Amino acid sequence: MAKVKIEESWKDALSEEFEKEYFKTLSDFVRKEYLSGIVFPPPPLVFNAFELCPFDNLKVVILGQDPYHGKGQAHGLCFSVPENVAVPPSLQNIYKEIADDIGEMPKIKNGNLEHWARQGVLLLNATLTVKARAAGSHQGKGWEEFTDSVIRKISEEKENIIFLLWGRYAQNKEILIDESKHLILKAAHPSPFSAYNGFFGCKHFSKANDYLKKRGENPIKWVE
């Protein structure tokens, strides 16, 4: 991670962050973890959320917590998995809400959300790497400081971004966002343990598109 491969507009926006001491320490830690064991996602995909959704194209931010820690699942986008990987329960619930909200059912067999990212949806986990089969193993190592700075940068330099904050962890990031400039939508986490406590029925997908359309922007095609 000595030379961070990241999309150019993000590279410019975050250039100062990459020079900070905590990020150098984080880079050393992550590099050693990759060399000494199995870590997800694969190294080229650590910054995939930024690669697929340039800073200049940003419309929506969805916040997750930790990458999937099972083999073949994580590919750098929160809630998303590559094609031909079983759709995780939280994403199944996201798809159910989309179907109820906009009346179209996504392809449940496919959990790849890259098509969202390419339309301007930043699918950002708070922690960008994880040790295999060890959930939360890279928390508290510096990733949160980095991703908090990303949220803060978006809030400061952009306008009219839609933040979808699902669950308490994501909602704790609200303090980083200027609500006078952006739309913040909050709901329960889509996990099977909490989806019935306010995620189902939140209608965030249609609300986000209504906001975009009112501003003369193209809505997100949540369903391929």
Image (cartoon, rainbow, N blue to C red):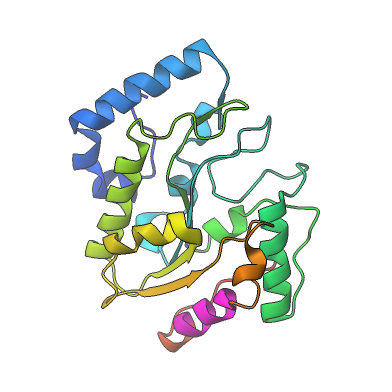
Is residue 2 shown to the viewer in this render? no
172 up-or-down from 71: above or below:
below
x and y, in percent, of residue 94 in the image: 66, 63
For the record, the magenta segment spans 203-212
x and y, in percent, of residue 103 in the image: 74, 80
Across the whole image, how many numbered discs are drawn on residues? 0
Residue drawn at (39%, 34%) of the image: 5
The quarter of the picture where residue 139 lies is top left
Residue drawn at (79%, 58%) of the image: 108
Q: Report the residue that reaches farthest toward the right.
A: 109
Q: Is residue 204 magenta?
A: yes
Q: Is residue 93 magenta?
A: no
Image side of residue 27 versus residue 191, left or right: left
Residue drawn at (66%, 45%) of the image: 81
Q: Main secondary structure of the magenta part?
A: helix
x and y, in percent, of residue 9 in the image: 32, 50
210 up-or-down from 97: above or below:
below
Image side of residue 210 versus residue 132, left or right: left
The quarter of the picture where residue 203 lies is bottom right
Q: Report the residue that reaches farthest toward the bottom.
A: 214
Most foreground residue, 166 or 95: 166
x and y, in percent, of residue 141 in the image: 35, 30
The quarter of the picture where residue 132 lies is top right
Is residue 189 shown to the viewer in this render? yes
Image side of residue 158 versus residue 169, left or right: left
